[in-house]
Amino acid sequence: RFLPHWLNRALQDLPDAEAYCVALRLAGLLPPIPTRPISSDKHARAKRIVSTKRTHARQAGIPVHASFTFDELSRAGKFVDRCPYSGHLLDWGKPKVHGGSRDSPSFDRIEASSAYSCEGVQVVAIVTNVMKGSLCMRRLLGALCFLQTDAFVGSHVPAAARPAHRRQQVQTLAAMASELPRSLAFVFRPARLGG
């Protein structure tokens, strides 16, 4: 299939249905996946990651707040065992490839234009951070839904590939639909409690 560059980059490591669930969580339409703090044997790696991020951010001209330290981040519970959006177990071991693998921990600045600070970051999987980029999650959700329409298939998928794409489309739509009840229950829960 032929996708706009921004969408292709966002979906490069995730199947559509998984990306849809991640986007729902990032947009606050599904609850995050529960996480636990990392064990103390992973602290040395976490310290190196913080140090590296501080250096790279400064080299890139991104401000780094004094609170962006291992000790502050650890006290705030930022070092977690899994990504709260994709559910991937984070690999706190030695990096296997330069730049990390899809399950490597990555600091996400909650507001993309903000400084690195204890309050302004969360630890997610690299695959989640790459998908999020600085995209509007509602725009991404709309695009993911459009990918499942006949209009998209007719205009973007070569005729020879359509049967295989349709089979994948049915599986993706089923997975996406299975998340809708949880998403709606999560979104409307506060209204029910208040009324």
Image (tube, rainbow, N blue to C red):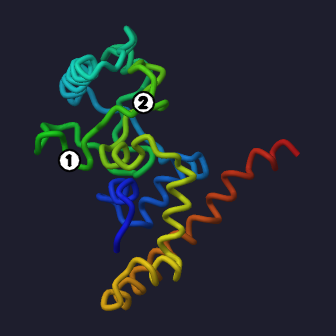
- The tag earlier along the polypeptide, 1 or 2, is 1
User: How many marks are shown on the rendered structure?
Assistant: 2
In the displayed structure image, the side of residue 59 where residue 190 appears, left or right = right
Height in image: 75 above or below 78? above
Residue found at the far right of this picture: 195
**Foreground pick, 114 / 69:** 114
Name the element at disc 2: strand
Identify the amino acid type marked 2. Answer: Arg
Q: Which quadrant is the N terminus positioned in?
A: bottom left
Whole-angstrom CA distance, mark 1 to mark 2, is 19 Å
Neighbour class for label 2 at 10 Å: few (<14), some, many (≥20)?
many
Pointer 1 with pointer 2, Cβ within 8 A:
no
Residue 171, percent across and down? 44, 79
Residue 109 — which label?
A: 2
Counting from the top left corner in percent of width and height, residue 120 is at 47, 24
Residue 49: give x, y in percent of width and height: 23, 26
Per the image, the residue denoted by label 1 is 101
Residue 190: image tag: none
- The part of the image, by quadrant, that contains residue 38 is top left
Residue shown at 47% from the left, 45% from the top: 135
**Relative depth, front residue between 163 and 105:** 163
Q: Residue 149, how many percent across, how many down?
A: 53, 77
Name the residue furthest front: 155
**Amino acid type at mark 1:** Ser
**Residue found 52% across the figure and 46% down from its top:** 136
Q: Which residue is outermost to the top?
A: 66
Q: Residue at x 22, y 23 (%)?
A: 56
